Amino acid sequence: MNLHEYQGKQLFAEYNIPVSKGKIIFSPEEVINACNEIGGTKWVVKTQVHAGGRGKSGGVELVDSPEMALEFSKKWLGKRLVTYQTDSKGQLVNSILIEECTEIKSELYLSAVVDRESQKIVFIGSSEGGVNIEDVAKNYPDKIIYQGVEYKDQNLVDQSINIANVLKLNDDQTKQFVPMIENLLRLFVENDLSLLEINPLVINDKGDLLCLDAKINIDSNALFRQPKINDMYDETQEDPQEAEAANNDLSYVSLDGNIGCMVNGAGLAMGTMDTIKYFGGNPANFLDVGGTATQERVTKAFKIILRDPDVKVVLVNIFGGIVRCDLIAEGVIAAIKDVDIKIPVIVRLEGNNAELGAEILLNSNIRIISINDLAEAAKKSVELAK
């Protein structure tokens, strides 16, 4: 789960991590009061979407009057922002962050991720901030430090100083930086983060450290114990089909193809998509209905798949284990009747009672193509999609 920048900065403030003074607004009527409350003569206005590249797409501006901020809000609120990290439809702008303008002396980079190999949280720091860290890693690897840390480690101060040295901080800035790392680590662990990125972390004209951005990802598997974080979820930033699937406990990812896929099991779903690609087709989605492919779940899965207007055929690939294939076949038939599908449906059943399931499909008098071999089923779906 992703957070908006303003939500990340709210968390930063709670953990005494320095951020700019700002206000979040959800309507143009709030803009003038927000600018006056923040104070100053210049402000930065930022569209809030779950994507990078906002500045290059016109989603971030420096304004020198509340009226300019008002015009910016009218331009973007309720509209969709397209960046290099979004699809062609972009993401909906529901809110705008207004912040005081910061005089920047230098830009740095700082992030934290989980390193599964070392089983530690690793802080990544660089003296080159404000740009893609991938480019820095490729062209200036000596300007990046990867520092593994552990929660409440007695060596955390020394490790923080190691990062500070690569960031080229002076003594005063290092004194600010050491507790910042401790607070960021505490925030990371206590809120079950999977990624934390500050790009840029800046040194302002007073020589102080300040977080000008906040990108935070939460481990979705831990949301059950993070009710406060869970309340920050913004469904409008997700693909509508993906959001609906998540609400129905289905694993769904929208893709650009025209062959709808319904599979039980993530590994089998990936294998199904690979097989479709092998025969020259393009899957329209990844969809794992889980180990219990009941009629209700299959019906909901069909409805989600068919909301994609590009889908020309649906390939159902079910491996019967605990759930028998004959029961799955009956569920598929009932779901197809309920949804009233107009496009071809190919069903491949394997496993427990697969032959009986195939016989039920054959005698159903419904437009279902039953093929037991995955390669043949995938090949047929590609042919029909064309």
Image (tube, helix red, strand yellow):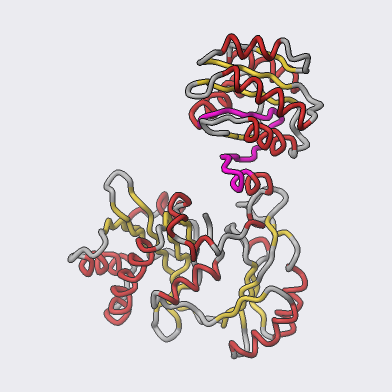
Q: Is residue 54 above or below residue 205?
A: above
Q: Nearer the viewer, residue 136 or 331?
A: 331
Instruction: Give left or right: position of 14 versus 150.
Output: right
Instruction: Give left or right: position of 152 versus 367.
Output: left
Split into 4 quadrants, where in the image is the C terminus? top right
**Res. 133 image quadrant:** bottom left
Residue 326's spot in the image, x, y percent?
A: 60, 17
Magenta part of the chain: 245-265
Count of numbered labels shown in the rendering: 0
Instruction: Give left or right: position of 317 versus 71.
Output: left
Q: Residue at x 61, y 89 (%)?
A: 37
Q: Is residue 188 above or below residue 245?
A: below
Residue 45 on the magenta span: no
Q: Nearer the viewer, residue 153 or 174?
A: 153
Residue 352's spot in the image, x, y percent?
A: 51, 15
Q: Nearer the viewer, residue 252 or 62?
A: 252
Q: Is residue 359 above or below residue 217?
A: above
Furthest-left residue in view? 154
